[in-house]
Amino acid sequence: MLDIQGTLVSLDLVERFFCCDLESCLGACCIEGDAGAPITKDEYELLKKILPTVWDDLLPRAQEEIAAHGVAYVDQEGDLVTNIIDGKNCVFTCYEPGGLCSCAIERAYRNGRIAWRKPLSCFLYPVRVKRLSDGTFAVNYDRWKICKCAEVLGRKEGLRVYQFLKEPLIERFGQAWYDELALTCEQYLKQFGD
């Protein structure tokens, strides 16, 4: 573990390679798993606010689920998460030609219809941030078989997890935190190599 300004960062962020390969996985992280994307209470309010803007991009089944049960629920672990349909799809998934799963929120952001990109847990994926019992934050790489192609592409491109996730890590922890992380990672790699 690395200690970056009191945050515990898994060595996986330094040692592992990663670069999303949507052509191979087709956005499986939005449709696999046992719960929706973790969100904060503020993000929950944002989801409700932007819902009219993204409504027409949502799957009909997602519209039905949101109308009946809202945009989020509390899962078995007590976390607030986006609602899902059919036991897998996040209600904000939509599909592009060729079967690529994408995010209706991010689509609206990229098209300039909203100013919010998407929930931070989605932007940070495959990294998960967890608050420990002592108040410290732990930053961990969530290895999942559906992301194997991203590990392969990351190695090919020479991108480590912390490099691939530069923008969302800065959004979550700030520029100074990220600069310290990057310097620490560089020093670690010089000392311990690949």
Image: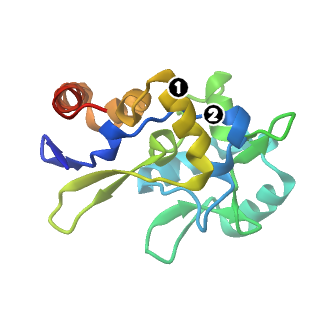
* Image coords of residue 122 (percent x, y): 52, 45
Tally the numbered discs: 2
Residue 77 lies, with reference to residue 186, above or below; the image says below
| Rendered-image quadrant of the C terminus | top left
Q: Write the residue at 44% across / 53% down.
A: 142
Write down the quadrant of residue 167 in the picture. top left
Amino acid on which the number 2 mark rests in the picture: Asp
Q: Write the residue at 56% across / 31% down.
A: 153
Q: Among all residues in the image, which is located at the extreme front?
A: 193
Q: Write the residue at 53% across / 61% down.
A: 81
Write down the quadrant of residue 21 in the picture. top right
Q: Does the residue at mark 2 contact the one at mark 1 (Cβ under 8 Å)?
A: no
* The disc label shown at residue 89, or none: none
10 Å neighbourhood of mark 2: few (<14), some, or many (≥20)?
some
Left or right of 189: which side holds 59? right
Q: Which residue is mark 2?
A: 21
Mark 2 or 1, closer to the camera: 1
Left or right of 72: which side holds 18? left
Residue 129 lies, with reference to residue 162, above or below; the image says below
Left or right of 17: which side holds 134? left
Q: Nearer the viewer, residue 92 or 19?
A: 19
Name the colour scheme.
rainbow
Amino acid on which the number 1 mark rests in the picture: Lys
**Can residue 73 be seen in the rendering of this structure?**
yes
* The disc label shown at residue 156, or none: 1
Residue 10 lies, with reference to residue 62, above or below; the image says above
Q: Write the residue at 68% across / 63% down.
A: 84
